[in-house]
Image (spheres, rainbow, N blue to C red):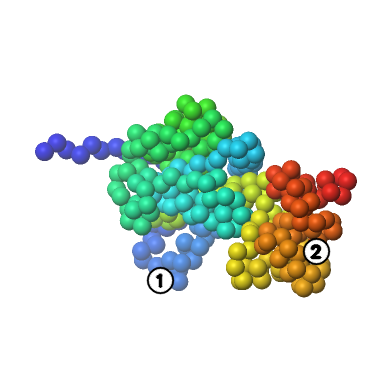
Amino acid sequence: MRPTPVEIVRVPTEARNRATHDIDLLSTLDVLRRINSEDATVPHSVAQVLPELAAAVDLGVTALRGGGRLHYFGAGSSGRLATMDAAELPPTFGIPGDRVVAHHAGGGNALVQAVEGIEDDFDLGRTDAAEVTSGDLAVGLAASGRTPYVAGALRRAREAGAHTVLISANPNAPLATECDVHVGVDTGAEVIAGSTRMKAGTGQKLALNAFSTAVMIRMGYTYSNLMVGVVASNAKLRGRMVTILTEATGLPEAACADALNRADGDTRIALVCLLTGAEVTVAAGALHAASGSVRAALRELQGG
C-alpha cells in the first residue's frame, strides 16, 4: 500500500499559542477566561482590514446593481459560515434568495457532517463556480488562505471575468494572488492549535457579516437602521413591520397598519406613502425607479 502523502503546513492558524500551553491544566473557569481573552482580540484584528473590506463591499454593490450575483465559496467551518450568512439575508433585508448564493464544498450533506479531504478538491471548486458570470462577485472564505477548493472556485471566477474577494485569517495568504481584494484578518494562533472554528472562524464571521450588511445598506435595503426590505407575509411579520413603520415615521400604529395593508405588506412602499403622502402606485413607481432605495425614492418624490 502506498504511503499517504504528508504536507507540512506553516500558516498562522496552525501555530501553537504561547498563552494557552497550560490550558489543559486549568480549572474550568480559567479555561473559559483564557478562551475569552483570546476571542477579545478578534474585533481589533478585523478593524485593521476595514479598508480592504470596504473595497470588497463596493465590488459587491457594483455587482448587485448591475444585475449580477454574489457567490460565496468555502469548505468546512468557512463554508458553513458562508451558507448561514447567505441564508439569513433574504428574511432580514428582503433581497431575492437567488442574489447571494453560498457554495459549500461537498454540498448540503457536508454542512451537517464533516467530509474529510473535500477542501483539497481544486476541480470541485472550479465545477461549483461554473455558473459565475462576468457581472458577479465571487467571495472565497479560507482560514488558511490556501484551500484548494476555494482556489479552484476563484480561478474559475476570474476566468469568467468576475471580480474576486478572499476572506482569510492569514495576512500572507497564498490565494491573495487569485483575487482582486484580500481581507486577511490576522487572528493569530488559535487557543487549540489549528482549530480554525475558533478565532479564525470568528474573524471570518465578523468580516462576512459586516460585508453583507454594508452591501445591503448601500443597496438601500434599510432606512436609517431599520429593516424595511421585508414583505410582511403573515400576521406576526405585519405586527413587526408596523412597529418599524412607527419608529421610522413617528405616526400612530393605526395609520401605519393601514398604510401597510394598502401596500399589500410591502414595508418600503408603506413607508414612502407615509412619509410623502403619495398613493401606493406612485410610491411603488418611485421605488422601482430608485432600485428599491427608500432614500432615493423620497428624494425623487420630495423634489431633492
Callout 1–callout 2 Cβ contact below 8 Å: no
What is the three-letter code of the residue carrying label 1?
A: Ser
Q: Is residue 133 left or right of residue 56?
A: left
| Cα separation between marks 1 and 2 | 53 Å
Q: Is residue 71 left or right of residue 65?
A: left
Q: Is residue 248 visible?
A: yes
Q: Nearer the viewer, residue 168 or 111?
A: 111
Residue 29, placed above or below residue 226: below
Label 1, secondary structure: give it.
loop
Q: Nearer the viewer, residue 192 or 215?
A: 215
Which quadrant of the structure image shows residue 273? bottom right
- Name the residue: 30% across, 50% down: 115
Q: Position of residue 150 (x, y in %)?
A: 42, 38
Question: Which residue has dot 1 on it?
Answer: 27
Q: Could you say which disc has been placed on residue 241 in the image?
A: none
What is the three-letter code of the residue carrying label 2?
A: Thr
Q: Is residue 77 left or right of residue 68?
A: left
Q: Could you say which disc has been placed on residue 249 in the image?
A: 2
Judged by depth in the image, the label closer to the viewer, 1 or 2, is 2
Residue 187, placed above or below residue 163: below
Label 2, secondary structure: give it.
helix
Q: Position of residue 217 (x, y in %)?
A: 68, 50
- Name the residue: 63% across, 59% down: 231
Position of the N terminus, as image quadrant, is top left
Residue 58, placed above or below residue 257: above
Q: Is residue 240 left or right of residue 145?
A: right
Q: Is residue 218 visible?
A: no
